Amino acid sequence: MARPTAPGAHSGAPGAPGIERPADRTAMRPAVAAAVSTRRGVELALLAFAAVITTGALVLVEANQEQELTWALLYLGAAYLGLLAAAHLAVRKFAPYADPLVLPVAALLNGIGLVMIHRVDLARIARAASLGNSEPTQEALRQIGWTAIGLVFFVGVLAFVPDHRTLSRYGYTAGFVGLVLLALPAVLPASLSEVNGARIWIRIGPASIQPGEFAKILFVVFFASFLVVKRDLFTTAGKHFLGMTFPRPRDLGPLLVAWGVAMAVLVFESDLGTSLMFFGIVLVMLYVATERISWVIIGLSIFGAGAFAAWTFVTRVQTRVFVWLDPFADYNGRGFQVSQGLFGLATGGIGGTGLGAGRPELVPFASTDFIFTSLGEELGLVGIAALLLLYCLLATRAMRSALAVRDTFGKLLAAGLGWAIAWQVFVVVGGVINLIPNTGITAPFVSYGGSSLVANYALVALVLRVSNAARQPAAEKRPGAAPGPHQGPLAPLAEASTEMVSRDQVRTPPHGVGHQPAGRPGPGDPTDRAPRGRTRGE
Amino acid sequence: MPELVLQITRAGFLALLWLFVLAALRVVRSDLYAASGLRAAAPGGRRPPRGGTSKPARGGGRSGPRALIVTAGALAGTRIALDGRPIMIGRADDSTLVLDDDYASTRHARISQSGDDWYVEDLGSTNGTYLDRNKVSGPTRVPIGTPIRIGKTVIELRS
C-alpha cells in the first residue's frame, strides 16, 4: 500500500522534480494557505448558488407552463436553501475538513431533479384534467419529503460514524445485510416485490423501497474491509499470459461467488441494472486493491458469458436486448419507451427547448428511469453535459479522497463509493441513450425515488467522512478518534514534506550491495509484491 | 411567455448551470495542492537562496541534515524534509514512510532528532535495521550520507 499513499498522491503535482531547487519551493507556497482553511465558506457559497439555480429553474418551469408566478416560489427556494444550510451546519460540526464540493454538487443535482419531477407532475396534471381523470399524486411533494429524510440520513451518518475505520469492523455484517436486502425481493411474493416486471422492490403500504440501493453501499463497505484483510489472496502470483499476471484458479473463488450473486439477481429478479451495478463495483474494487487488469478481464468475460446465457432463457432480458439492438423495430410495443426517449433527446438538440417548454411527459417514466431524456429535451446537450460533469466531479472528489486518505480501508471505501456513483450514472444514461440495454435503475439524486435519494445521501455522507479524515491536519486529529492499536509519534506522510523527485536525479551512492538501478524497479522478485509497474510492465 | 424572453432565459439558465460547474472546477484547482502532502513542503524560505550549483550550499544555514531521501527500494526518490519531528518507518499505515516490503516490520525503525544530531533506533523489527553495514541495536547517531538499510529500502540523510 506504499505507493498510493506515498508518491502516488503527489504525482499529479507540477513542479515536484528537483531536490535542491528553491524556486520550486516557492511555487508550492500557496498550498500552505489552502491546506489550513477548512473551506467551509466555499461550500456554503456553492450551496447558495445551487439553491439559486434550483429556484431559477423552478421559476422558468412555472413561467413556461403558464402558471401563476407568485412569491411562494421564492419561499420554496429559501426553504430548500434552509434544508441545505442545515446539512452544511452538520458538516461544519461533524466533519469540518470535509471536501467542500461534494455536498453542493449533490444538492444541485437533487434540486434540478426536484424541478424536473415537478415539471412532469404539471404535465401529468394537465393531461389528467383534459381526460377528466382525478388529479394524480404530486411526485415532487413526496420527493421533497424524501429529500428531507435523505438529509436526515446524511446528518445521521456524519454524526454516528465519527471515524470511517469503525465501519471496517462491521464488514461481514454489512455484507450479510446487503445480501439479505438484495435477495429479499426475489424471495418475497411478487405482489409485494414486483413493479413493472422487475422484482427489486419491497412495497409496504403506500411506500415502496428499493433495497438494492442500500445494498450498494453495504457491499462497498464489505468489500473494502474484506479486501483490506484478504488482499494478499488476490495478489498471489499466477501465470503470466498475454502480458498480464493471471491469478491461480483456486484464488478465483470469491470472484465466482460475486458472479453467482450477480447472475442470481439477473435471473430471479430480472433486473440487469442491479446486477451490473453489483458486479461492476466488485470488479473495480478488486482492481483498485490489486492493480491487476486480469481480474477485470476475467470478471468481464464471465459476466458476459453469464449475461449471454441469461439472454437465452430470461424473457425480460431478451426484450431489453431486442429493444437495444433496434428500438424502432417494435415502436408501438416494446421499443416505445426507448424510442420516445430518443425522440425527446433529439427534440432537445444542442440547446434544449427551455425548461417547461418541451413535452418530456410523452416518455413513459419521465420522472424516474427516463428523467435524463426529460432533462435532455429541455436543457439540451449543453445542459446534460453540465449535469454529467457534476456527476464526474462527485466521483472524482471521492477518488481524490481515496488518494489522499492514509488508511487502506478508507481508500477502498472512498474509491468504491465514488465508482458506484459514476458506474450508476453510466448504466442509467447509457441505457436511455441506447448505448447499452436499458436497465431501469435510477439516476443518483435526480430521479424520483425515495430509496435512491436517501441511499445516495448516506453514500455522500460516507465520502465526506473519508475526505474529512484525508484533509484533516495531523495535529488536530482527535485523540479518541483513532481506535487503532498504534500509538506513538504520529507524523503522517502527508505532513512530512514528501515530494516526488524523478529517480534519475537521486544519485545512488556506490555503497551497498544489491542496489537496484535507480531508473527501474528491480527484476521480478517473488517476494516483492509492489503492485505498480511490475505486474503490468514485465 | 414571449418567445424572446423564453430564448434569453433558456440560454441564461444554461449559462448559470455552467457557471456553477466552472466555480466548482475553480475550487478543484485551488484545492489541488491541499491535502496531498505538498503543503508542508514549504517550510521553504528557510532554505538559503540558490547560491551554488546543484551541491547543497553548506555555508548558508544550519549544518544539520535537512532531508531524508530514499535511495533504493520501491520508494526510491521519495524525499522527506526533516522538521524536528521523529520519522517512523514501517509497514503500518500511519508511519511517516510506509514500506511495502516483506522484510520490513509493521513498526520497524524510528529516526529522531536529539540536539543537532539524528539518531536511528530499531523498534524490535524482525529483520533488523542496518546503519551502513552494522546492525543497529540501540539508538545510533546517523552521519549525513550514511545509508540506513531496512529490508530492500535504503535511506539516508542529506543536508
Image (cartoon, rainbow, N blue to C red):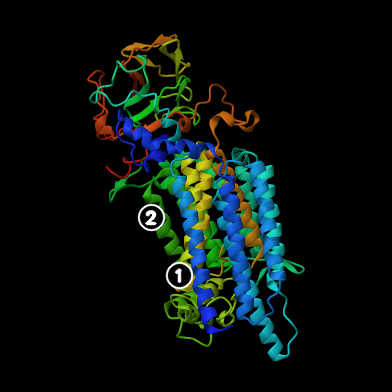
Image position of A85 (left or right of B83): right
Note whether residue A446 is visible.
no
Q: Quadrant of residue B158?
A: top left
Q: Nearer the viewer, mark 1 or mark 2?
A: 1
Quarter of the picture containing the N terminus of chain A is top left
Q: Is residue B139 above or below residue B30?
A: above
Front one among A492 and A252: A492
Neighbourhood count class around disc 2 (C-alpha, 10 Å): few under 14, some 14–19, many 20 upward: few
Q: Quadrant of residue B140?
A: top left
Neighbourhood count class around disc 1 (C-alpha, 10 Å): few under 14, some 14–19, many 20 upward: some
Q: Position of residue A92 (x, y in %)?
A: 64, 44
Q: Is residue A375 above or below residue A467?
A: below
* Whether marks 1 and 2 lie on the same chain: yes
Label 2 lies in what chain?
A: A
Residue hosting label 1: A382
Q: Which mark is residue A297?
A: 2
Indicate the amino acid at tag 1: Val
Front one among A277 and B142: B142
Label 1 lies in what chain?
A: A
Task: Report helix, strand or loop for mark 1.
Answer: helix
Q: Are marks 1 and 2 in contact (CB under 8 Å)?
A: no
Distance from label 1 to label 2 (Cα)?
A: 34 Å
Q: Position of residue B145 (x, y in %)?
A: 30, 17
Indicate the amino acid at tag 2: Ile
Front one among B18 and A412: B18
Q: Position of residue A488 (x, y in %)?
A: 55, 21
Task: Report helix, strand or loop for mark 2.
Answer: helix
Q: Is residue A46 above or below residue B81?
A: below
Image position of A242 (left or right of A270): left
